[in-house]
Amino acid sequence: MIVHNKLVRDKIPDIIERAGKKPVTHILSDEEFYLELESKLNEEFAEYQADKSIEELADMIEVIYAITEARGWSVSELETTRKKKAEKRGSFKAKIYLECVEDGN
């Protein structure tokens, strides 16, 4: 037996069964789900940091979308908010690294 104790994608139990194994699962409460999504985002970020792959970035986005919807927002609201913030404060395309801010005197 391998213990995982983590949130998994919806089709993972079926994939495990097709491999001839028996997944033991339960459905999380909303509060448990929020906590596990936060943990999952940290897990996916660590995986991205380790291998810098586009697949891990896609996994992070999937978790971010799930957090968005779990908190009662839509993905389109998230994207609208992102665009507004980019318009107001910019994005990261110019690669600007702020070293310090000197006093104007």
Image (cartoon, grey):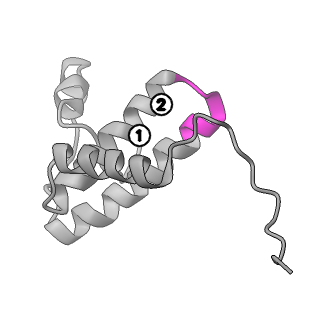
The amino acid sitting under disc 1 is Met
- Mark number, residue 103: none
Seen at 18% across and 30% down, the residue is: 11
Q: Is residue 47 left or right of residue 41?
A: right
Three-letter residue code for mark 2: Glu
Number of other residues with Cα within 10 Å of mark 2, as a class: few under 14, some 14 to 19, many 20 or more: some
Left or right: 71 in relation to 86: left
**Of the pair 87 and 92, the residue shown nearer to us:** 87
Q: Residues within 10 Å of mark 1 (few under 14, many from 20)?
A: many
Q: Are marks 1 and 2 in contact (CB under 8 Å)?
A: yes
Q: Is residue 57 above or below residue 78?
A: above
Q: Secondary structure at mark 1?
A: helix
Kindly state the secondary structure of the residue where label 2 is placed: helix
Residue located at (17% from left, 58% from top): 70
Residue found farthest to the front: 105
Please tell me whether residue 48 belongs to the stretch shown in magenta: yes
Q: CA distance from mark 1 to mark 2?
A: 6 Å
Q: Position of residue 69 (x, y in %)?
A: 17, 53
Tell me where the magenta segment starts and ends, as one range.
47-53
Q: Nearer the viewer, residue 32 or 20?
A: 32
Q: Quadrant of the C terminus?
A: bottom right
Question: Residue 102: horizontal and vertical position, in percent?
Answer: 84, 71
Question: Magenta span has 52?
Answer: yes
Residue 56 is labelled as 2
Residue underneath mark 1: 60
- Viewer-closest of 99 and 26: 99
Q: Give how far across and how far down residue 21 sits, in percent.
A: 25, 28
Look at the magenta stretch and give its main secondary structure: helix
Which image quarter holds the N terminus?
A: top left
- Does residue 77 sit above or below 93 in this rendering? below
